[in-house]
């Protein structure tokens, strides 16, 4: 298994650097260009949500993205020390409850706001979230060859 850890400040302007790394690693893992772009968008949505909601926009905090790659999957573990995700949002993200199942011709036509959880839920094969010792941990995985 291969591992890479990325850390950024909770500044929306720093997300693009993480996005470039996620897209490159997704391509390296053998995901198609479209799927790699969708994975990148999912991570950008998750990090943006952590900054806006968990950290309430405070730019002086840290986010860690641990990326693991093995023969079968690509795993993204996002950690922050902000406010916990509300239970209703966890339910929407992990189980898909309350997510509008709209049909979009491709990922570029999904509206930019209000659909972050839907994007993540559709893109990833497994999703889990736990809050332990004051830390949020969002785990997202996608099978290689997707």
Image: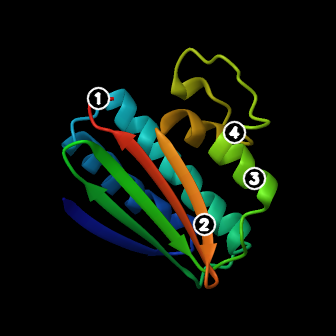
Query: What separation in Å lies between label 3 and label 4 (alpha carbons)?
Result: 12 Å
The residue at the point 70 percent across, 21 percent down is 102
Query: What separation in Å lies between label 3 and label 2 (alpha carbons)?
Result: 12 Å
Q: Are marks 1 and 2 in contact (CB under 8 Å)?
A: no
Q: Are marks 2 and 4 in contact (CB under 8 Å)?
A: no
Q: Residue 4: percent from the left, percent from the top?
A: 26, 66
Picture quarter containing residue 103?
Answer: top right
Q: Residue 106: percent from the left, percent from the top?
A: 52, 20
**Residue 39 seen by the camera:** yes
Query: What separation in Å lies between label 1 and label 4 (alpha carbons)?
Result: 22 Å
**Residue 116 seen by the camera:** no
SS at badge 3: helix
Compare marks 1 and 2 and give the one earlier in the sequence.
Answer: 1
Looking at the rendered image, the quarter that the C terminus falls into is top left
Q: Which residue is mark 2?
A: 130
Compare marks 3 and 4 and give the one earlier in the sequence.
Answer: 3
Query: What separation in Å lies between label 2 and label 4 (alpha carbons)?
Result: 21 Å
The numbered dot on residue 115 is 4
- Tell me: residue 124, above or below residue 51: above
Compare marks 3 and 2 and give the one earlier in the sequence.
Answer: 3
Name the front one of labels 3 and 2: 2
Query: What separation in Å lies between label 1 and label 2 (alpha carbons)?
Result: 30 Å
Q: Which residue is mark 3?
A: 89
């Amino acid at each position: 298994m291969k591992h890479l850890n990325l850390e950024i400040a909770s500044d929306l302007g720093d997300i693009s650097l993480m996005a470039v790394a996620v897209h490159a690693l997704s391509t390296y893992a053998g995901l198609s260009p479209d799927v790699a772009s969708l994975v990148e968008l999912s991570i950008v949505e998750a990090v943006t949500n952590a900054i806006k909601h968990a950290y309430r926009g405070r730019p002086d905090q840290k986010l860690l993205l641990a990326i693991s790659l093995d023969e079968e999957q690509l795993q993204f573990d996002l950690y922050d020390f902000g406010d916990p995700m509300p239970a209703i949002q966890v339910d929407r993200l992990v189980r898909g409850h309350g997510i509008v199942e709209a049909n979009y011709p491709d990922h570029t036509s999904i509206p930019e706001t209000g659909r972050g959880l839907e994007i993540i839920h559709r893109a990833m094969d497994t999703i889990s979230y736990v809050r332990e010792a004051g830390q949020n941990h969002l785990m997202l995985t996608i099978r290689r060859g997707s």
